[in-house]
Image: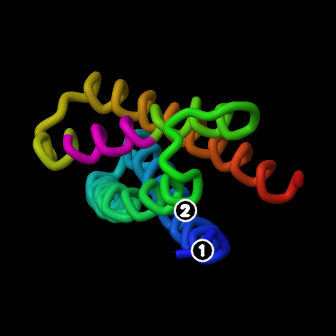
Amino acid sequence: MNQTLWARMHGGATHFPIALLLVSVMFDHAAFWWRGETRRREFRAVGFYTLLIAAAAAPAAVLSGLALSRGVLLGKGMLALHHYFLWPAFGLLIGLAVWRLVVREHASRRALGVYLALATLTVVAMMTAGYWGGEMVLGQ
């Protein structure tokens, strides 16, 4: 495949995990702080399913990005900056999804607080990776 096609595929594939992760974290924060149990459960469900879809969609973004960079895992310059944030974000996203699948509703409030801190860090890393990816495309 040519690089233009990989660039289009990567550009399209990256937005799903980014947006879904952001939505997941917002709903999980709402669930953590909300007082009513019914609404809290609903918010947690939205956070759970959007996280799972984000984690399921992320490999398409990663694989198309690797094809676009011709298999370079780190690189130099802006590509390195992109990857410095991308790899931890990807690992955390997959790890958080697995944790949520295993733990489900049986996490303590302290564990949920740690989860939220890590999920928020994941959003920041993902957004920063997206920023540097955009700079590579738009900055040229």
Q: CA distance from mark 2 to mark 1?
A: 18 Å
- The mark that comes first in sequence, 2 or 1, is 1
Q: Is residue 5 left or right of residue 52?
A: right
Identify the residue at horizontal 49%, vertical 62% (top origin): 64
Nearer to the camera, 38 or 44:
44
Nearer to the camera, 13 or 32:
13
Identify the residue at horizontal 60%, vertical 77% (top origin): 5
Q: Secondary structure at mark 2?
A: helix
What number is the disc on residue 2? 1
Horizontal and vertical percent position of residue 23: 50, 58
Magenta stretch bounds: 90-98
What number is the disc on residue 96? none
Q: Is residue 100 left or right of residue 112?
A: left
Q: State which quadrant residue 127 falls in.
A: top right
Horizontal and vertical percent position of residue 122: 49, 37
Whether residue 24 appears in magenta in the rendering, the answer is no
Up-down: is 110 above or below 14?
Answer: above
Q: Secondary structure at mark 1?
A: loop
Identify the residue at horizontal 20%, vertical 44% (top origin): 98
Residue type indicated by callout 2: Thr
Give the labeled residue for mark 2: 14
Whether residue 93 appears in magenta in the rendering, the answer is yes
Nearer to the camera, 108 or 85:
85
Q: Quadrant of the C terminus?
A: bottom right
Identify the residue at horizontal 53%, vertical 40% (top origin): 86
Can I make out residue 120 in this image?
A: no
Q: Main secondary structure of the magenta part?
A: helix
